[in-house]
């Protein structure tokens, strides 16, 4: 979970130091993939921690929103 969530921002920042438009799109696609993986891990965590399910659900929604934002950026660049 820590790796995938940290990778979202790291790849986005690296993409902003792009070598070209193809590199930027590639890095943002990786960020989107990592956001999706983070969402997956959060869903598993929610199933295992019923007492924290509301707090975890908020994080799942945020991960989903980040993924949608990254998709919109990709669509705009292509």
Image (spheres, helix red, strand yellow):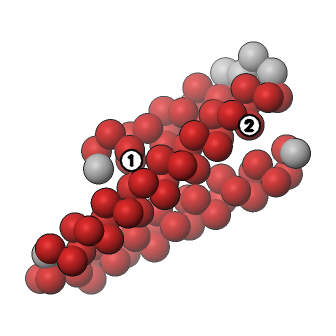
The residue that appears at 82% across and 54% down in the rendered structure is 75
Q: Is residue 56 above or below residue 72?
A: below
Q: Residues within 10 Å of mark 2 (few under 14, many from 20)?
A: many
Q: Is residue 58 above or below residue 76?
A: below
The residue that appears at 22% across and 67% down in the rendered structure is 45
Is residue 52 something that shows in the picture?
no
Q: How many marks?
A: 2
Q: Is residue 73 above or below residue 43?
A: above
Q: Is residue 51 above or below residue 45?
A: below
Q: Which residue is mark 1?
A: 5
The reply, left or right, for residue 67 in relation to residue 63 is right
C-alpha separation, residue under disc 1 versus residue under disc 2: 19 Å
Q: Position of residue 72 (x, y in %)?
A: 75, 58
- Tell which of 40 and 64 is nearer to you: 40
Label 2 residue SS: helix
Q: Position of residue 21 (x, y in %)?
A: 82, 29
Q: Position of residue 31 (x, y in %)?
A: 55, 43
Which one is earlier in the sequence, the residue at label 1 or at label 2? 1
- The quarter holding residue 23 reads top right
Label 1 residue SS: helix
Q: Residues within 10 Å of mark 1 (few under 14, many from 20)?
A: some
- The quarter holding residue 7 reads top left
The residue that appears at 58% across and 26% down in the rendered structure is 14
The reply, left or right, for residue 72 in relation to residue 65 is right
Is residue 49 something that shows in the picture?
yes
**Quadrant showing the C terminus:** top right
- The quarter holding residue 22 reads top right
């Amino acid at each position: 979970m820590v790796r995938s969530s940290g990778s979202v921002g790291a790849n986005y920042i690296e993409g902003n130091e792009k070598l070209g438009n193809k590199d930027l799109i590639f890095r943002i696609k990786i960020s989107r993939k990592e956001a999706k993986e983070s969402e997956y891990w959060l869903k598993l965590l929610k199933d295992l921690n019923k007492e924290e399910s509301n707090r975890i659900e908020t994080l799942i929604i945020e991960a989903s929103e980040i993924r949608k934002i990254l998709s919109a950026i990709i669509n705009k660049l292509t």
